[in-house]
Image (cartoon, rainbow, N blue to C red):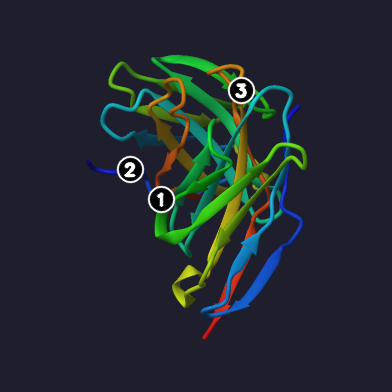
């Protein structure tokens, strides 16, 4: 099976702009989670989607939003970008059922905000 | 609230020696525990998990981890380290009480295996 894919891999944006990141999970996986990884804060949970519904959300401002489509692909949007949003954004998919919570991560999207 | 602590930022071992990367956790319900590894410029890879059953779980690349409920620990181990094991290792916990739980990751431990 193909792994988790994320597009784009690298992105440079200016403060105040908005950005959309895309994630395609492993075929058959219904759960998609997003994480922000930075050297100072480590891996921070953003949100999880399962069957097009947001199941859980981390402690991020409302500028961070996401959605999941019927084919389980997911997008994450960040509006009004700030310098502190520069990070590696990781998408992870899992089967999502009972006992199947191990996650398979994509390579990430490196976002730089200038 | 759930949390994970990896008390060592860095672990150095010689090739062929056993290695241990430590992890302790806190969660209100039953813990689902995971270890992931991140190689440079790559995403995280799943190594192993504890959901229920035997306290010693075996995973990829010869790694294993021991779940200790009384000490709330889930240390990662390998009997004989390889130079190629050098990477960043993350421990994660999820509340098994609900499918809607989120995974909380530790800050990571950099493992360096010297020839």
Position of residue B108 relative to residue A74, above or below, is below
Q: Residue at x 58, y 59 (%)?
A: B77
Residue B101 numbered tag: none
Which secondary structure, mark 1?
loop
Position of residue A50 relative to residue B76, above or below, is above
Tags 3 and 1 both on a single chain = yes
Chain letter of the residue beneath label 2 in the structure image: A
B79 vs A53, nearest the viewer = B79
CB under 8 Å between callouts 2 and 1? Answer: yes
Position of residue A103 relative to residue A13, above or below, is above
| Residue B64 visible (yes or no) | yes
Residue A74 position within the rendered picture, expressed as x and y whole percent measured from the top left = 39, 27
Identify the mark nearer the N-term, 3 or 2: 2
Horizontal arrangement in the rendering, residue A44 relative to residue A68 (left or right): right
| Residue matched to label 2 | A5
Image quadrant where one finds the N terminus of chain A: top left
Identify the mark nearer the N-term, 2 or 1: 2
Q: Residue at x 43, y 18 (%)?
A: A50
| Residue matched to label 1 | A107
Give the class, few, some or many, for how many residues have Cα within 10 Å of label 2's Cα (few <14, many ≥20). many
Cα separation between marks 2 and 1: 7 Å
Residue A57 numbered tag: 3
Chain letter of the residue beneath label 1 in the structure image: A
B4 vs A50, nearest the viewer = B4
Identify the mark nearer the N-term, 3 or 1: 3
Residue A11 position within the rendered picture, expressed as x and y whole percent measured from the top left = 45, 50
Which secondary structure, mark 2?
strand
Cα separation between marks 3 and 2: 22 Å
Residue A27 position within the rendered picture, expressed as x and y whole percent measured from the top left = 26, 31
Tags 2 and 1 both on a single chain = yes
């Amino acid at each position: 099976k193909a792994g988790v894919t994320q597009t784009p891999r690298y992105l440079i944006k200016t403060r105040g702009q908005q950005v959309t990141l895309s994630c395609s999970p492993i075929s058959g996986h219904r759960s998609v989670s997003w994480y922000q990884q930075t050297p100072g804060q480590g891996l921070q949970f953003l949100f999880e989607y399962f069957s097009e519904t947001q199941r859980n959300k981390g402690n991020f401002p409302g500028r961070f939003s996401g959605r999941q489509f019927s084919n389980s692909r997911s997008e994450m949007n960040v509006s009004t970008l700030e310098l502190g949003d520069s990070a590696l954004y990781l998408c992870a998919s899992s089967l999502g059922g009972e006992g199947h919570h191990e996650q398979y991560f994509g390579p990430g999207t490196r976002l730089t905000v200038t | 609230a759930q949390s994970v602590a990896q008390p060592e930022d860095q672990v150095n071992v010689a090739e062929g020696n056993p290695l241990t990367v430590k992890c302790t956790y806190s969660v209100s319900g039953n813990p689902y525990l995971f270890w992931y590894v991140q190689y440079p410029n790559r995403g995280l890879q799943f190594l192993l998990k504890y959901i229920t059953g035997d306290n010693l779980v075996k995973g990829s690349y010869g790694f294993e981890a021991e779940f200790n409920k009384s000490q709330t620990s889930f240390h990662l181990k390998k009997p004989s380290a390889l130079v190629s094991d050098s990477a960043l290792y993350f421990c994660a916990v999820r509340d098994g009480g609900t499918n809607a739980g989120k995974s909380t990751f530790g800050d990571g431990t950099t493992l360096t295996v010297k020839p």
